[in-house]
Image (cartoon, rainbow, N blue to C red):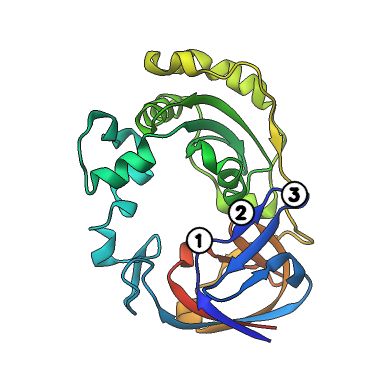
Amino acid sequence: MTYQGVLTKMESEFLEPIQYYLVFENDFININQLLEKRITLEFVVYQCLNCGLNKPIFRQGFCKSCFFDIPQAADWIMRPELSTAHLDQEDRDLEYEKKVQLQPHIVYLANSSNVKVGVTRKSQVPTRWIDQGAHEAIEIVEVPNRYLAGITEVALKEHVSDKTNWRNMLKNDIQDEDLVAWRERLKSYIPEEAHDYYIANNTETNLVFPVDKYPEKPKSLNLVKEKQYSGKLVGIKGQYLIFDDDRVFNIRSNEGLVIGLSL
């Protein structure tokens, strides 16, 4: 059986374990059902997620010209403190920016390879934590716009990491942390503008990923370079497919590739 379509990040369901779905234009696959099966991935062409053209992907699933033009790839996406919609100031497309920036956002702590601080729209909890491969997470503040979340993250990352070590996350080289205690320790560093939005009474969320075998030395699969790869799928964590030879394939970083997947 063969499927073909353009890669976008896997959809997920917050169950135990997490359920993952690869969604194509006219089909979808429950990836959990492929565990312990040998699958073949093949690179076909590029397809920019914005213009749809067969042009090399630059970042985030977009070709280079689209990346530097469309609001979905503006700097405030990765650096929320640069958001300006709350000031009625346009970056690339004010209507889009208001739609995304002027909604409730969460600043959170997640533990994937280590405790890190992050920002996401409230509507993306717990999806954001699943995508990062976090086995535990907790909300710190809930603010009404992206800017306030951004400046809170900037302040807190002076005292806690804002990065994930993807290799340690995939090796499951992690330890449990008391995220409530972390939240309490970081409270005093929250900017004054966001202090009233501090969440004082919540508990951490735990996540279980469908992994039968963790890689000892994860090696990233470059499908564009190799063109085709076959291996037995032994796990899914974050946005990674994990194979029995320690190869791992990051779906998120390969968005915009048209691939063939055969069983």
Q: Which mark is residue 252?
A: 1
Mark nearer the viewer, 1 or 3: 3
Residue linked to disc 3: 15
Residue 18 located left or right of residue 228: right
**Residue 70 location, x and y as percent?**
27, 57
Kind of residue indicated by mark 2:
Gly
Mark nearer the viewer, 2 or 3: 3
**Around disc 1, counting alpha carbons within 10 Å, would you say few (fewer than 14), some (14 to 19), or many (20 or more)?**
some
Q: Earlier in the sequence, mark 2 or mark 3?
A: 3
**Around disc 2, counting alpha carbons within 10 Å, would you say few (fewer than 14), some (14 to 19), or many (20 or more)?**
many
Q: Residue at x 62, y 43 (%)?
A: 112
**Residue 134 location, x and y as percent?**
63, 44
In the rendered image, which quarter contains the C terminus? bottom right
Kind of residue indicated by mark 3:
Leu
Disc 2, disc 3: CB below 8 Å? no
**Residue 195 location, x and y as percent?**
45, 14
Whole-number angstrom distance, CA of label 1 to CA of label 2 = 9 Å
Residue 121 located left or right of residue 203: left
Q: Which mark is residue 238?
A: 2
Q: Is residue 33 above or below residue 90?
A: below
Disc 1, disc 2: CB below 8 Å? yes
Nearer to me, 114 or 74: 74
Q: Earlier in the sequence, mark 1 or mark 2?
A: 2
